[in-house]
Image (cartoon, rainbow, N blue to C red):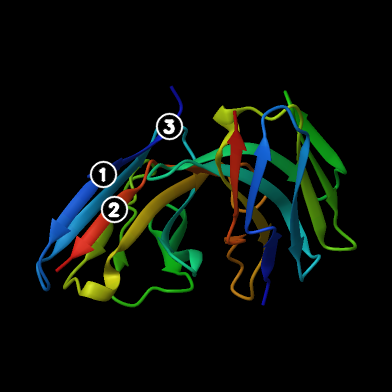
């Protein structure tokens, strides 16, 4: 069964720093990987989607990479800002035995950017 | 605006009183699903639907029902809620199962007393 792990569980950095969030998964047979942001008490906002055939995706200050063979993804945030403070969730999409394609989530990295 | 809309956002109810959480998407997506989020357990899939009239169980379906009579709507039904169903619930949709971006609603915080 697919398992997704995110390290670290929490991270606190001063404003302006570049940072990397890590995600690993146990089964490399995935369709794609998606990074989300969750603010306290709020819904999930999609940040980046990486198809299994892609190596990376960029959106503004965010860059996500995918190494499917080693079961790893990283989310790079450049020049962090206090508004980046949130929980970041990694989810992989594969196919289970019934043909379902659920998102399997990690438990997230809680990021605090200090002004 | 493309979105997934859940209602209500907050709900407090008593054990055994049937309730429905609605979910609607305006993107003509085929695949819809429900997740619950609990501290220490993360997000887990409850039910999913590949298309109209096609639904099936996810990882934690006990105590829940769903229906998909129209493409845009996917309500979650708790026939007899219990306190262990207190959780944060999310509805999600994507154009097709698996290969396309998933969009989530704003969540419904349910408390069962």
In the rendering, at what x and y percent does residue A108 appear?
59, 56
| Residue B75 seen | no
In the rendering, at what x and y percent does residue B9 appear?
26, 44
Please tell me which of labels 1 and 2 falls first in the chain.
1
Callout 2 crowding tier (Cα within 10 Å): few <14, some 14–19, many ≥20: some
Which label sits on residue B3? 3
Is there CB contact under 8 Å for labels 1 and 2? yes
Please tell me which of labels 3 and 2 falls first in the chain.
3
Mark 1–mark 3 Cα distance, whole angstroms, equals 15 Å
Q: Which residue is mark 2?
A: B109
Among the 4 quarters of the image, the one containing residue A79 = top right
A12 or B25: nearer the viewer:
A12
The residue located at (82%, 62%) in the rendering is A71
A75 or A11: nearer the viewer:
A11
| Residue A106 seen | yes
For the C terminus of chain A, the quadrant is top right
The chain to which mark 2 is attached is: B
**How many callouts does the rendering have?**
3
Among the 4 quarters of the image, the one containing residue B26 = top left
């Amino acid at each position: 069964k697919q398992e997704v792990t995110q390290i670290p569980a929490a991270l606190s950095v001063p404003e302006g720093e570049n940072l990397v969030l890590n995600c690993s998964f146990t089964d490399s047979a995935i369709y794609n990987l998606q990074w989300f942001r969750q603010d306290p008490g709020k819904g999930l906002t999609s940040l980046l989607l990486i198809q299994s055939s892609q190596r990376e995706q960029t959106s503004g200050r965010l860059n996500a990479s995918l190494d499917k063979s080693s079961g790893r993804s990283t989310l790079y945030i450049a020049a962090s800002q206090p508004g980046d403070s949130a929980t970041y969730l990694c989810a992989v999409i594969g196919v289970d035995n019934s043909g379902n394609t659920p998102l399997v989530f990690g438990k997230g990295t809680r990021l605090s950017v200090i002004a | 605006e493309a979105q997934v809309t859940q209602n209500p956002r907050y709900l407090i109810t008593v054990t055994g009183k049937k309730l429905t959480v609605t979910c609607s998407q305006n993107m003509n997506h085929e695949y819809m699903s429900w997740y619950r989020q609990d501290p220490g357990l993360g997000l887990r899939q409850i039910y999913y639907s590949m298309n109209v009239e096609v639904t099936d169980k996810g990882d934690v379906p006990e105590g829940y029902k769903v229906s998909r009579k129209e493409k845009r709507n996917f309500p979650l039904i708790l026939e007899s809620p219990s306190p262990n169903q207190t959780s944060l619930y999310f509805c999600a949709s994507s154009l097709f199962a698996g290969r396309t971006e998933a969009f989530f609603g704003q969540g419904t915080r349910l408390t069962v007393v």
